[in-house]
Image: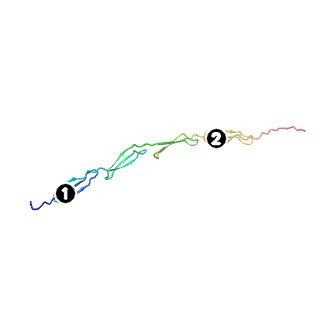
Amino acid sequence: YDEGKPALGHDDVIVHTPATCTEAGSSAHTCKRCDRSFVETGEPALGHNYALEHVPPTCTEPGQTTHTCKRCPDTYTEVGTASLGHDYAVTETPATCTEAGHVVRACTRCDDTHTEEGAPALGHDYVVTEVEPTCTEVGTSVHACTRCDDSFAEEGAAALGHDYVVTETPATC
């Protein structure tokens, strides 16, 4: 030991570690001349700073909120509102003489649709009007549907022809 020389003091190398979302900041001190080292606690952990992304519910999927930290890769998702279910508007097309009816259910919130078969085609309901034959025209049967504009005619009895009656008029002076 030499009393004539003053002590050199520590010559620390300091490594700063900044605070993160989950860990406090620190400063690690290590002396270049001796084995002394210690760690000083710096600022406290910052905690997460989440940005929120809300996704509303749909007919088939629940709503959710995704939390994503702005400083680190931490993220998690919370399920929120239950799915809405479909809200169907119903359009019924009645059966006609030649086409079956059907029911279309179309969701008012999304593009989901279902078509169901309805009543079968009704077939024509014809009323027949007979047109009697005349001396020069054949008779006909006119078939007209009571539900639609469909109609047709069938030839019936033959023309009657003329049936002349001879009337004699006596001669006069």
The quadrant where residue 160 appears: top right
Q: Residue at x 20, y 56 (%)?
A: 29
* Amino acid type assigned to the residue bearing label 1 in the image: Thr
* Amino acid type assigned to the residue bearing label 2 in the image: Ala
Query: Which is more foreground, mark 1 or mark 2?
Result: 1
The quadrant where residue 124 appears: top right
* Secondary structure of residue under mark 1: strand
Which quadrant of the figure contains the C terminus? top right
Q: CA distance from mark 1 to mark 2?
A: 110 Å
- Which of the marked residues, 1 or 2, is nearer the chain's N terminus? 1
- Identify the residue at the far bottom of this view: 4
Residues at circles 1 and 2 in contact by the CB criterion of under 8 Å: no
Note whether 1 is above or below 105 in the view shown: below
Horizontal arrangement in the rendering, residue 84 relative to residue 23 (left or right): right
Q: Residues within 10 Å of mark 2 (few under 14, many from 20)?
A: some
Instruction: State the count of labels.
Output: 2
Q: Which residue is mark 2?
A: 144
Horizontal arrangement in the rendering, residue 2 relative to residue 32 (left or right): left
Q: Residue at x 67, y 39 (%)?
A: 129
Q: Residue at x 35, y 45 (%)?
A: 78
* Secondary structure of residue under mark 2: strand
Q: Residues within 10 Å of mark 1 (few under 14, many from 20)?
A: some
Q: Which residue is mark 1?
A: 30
The quadrant where residue 139 appears: top right
Horizontal arrangement in the rendering, residue 44 relative to residue 86 (left or right): left
Q: x, y percentage for residue 93? A: 54, 42
Q: x, y percentage for residue 89? A: 49, 42
- Identify the residue at the far right of this view: 173
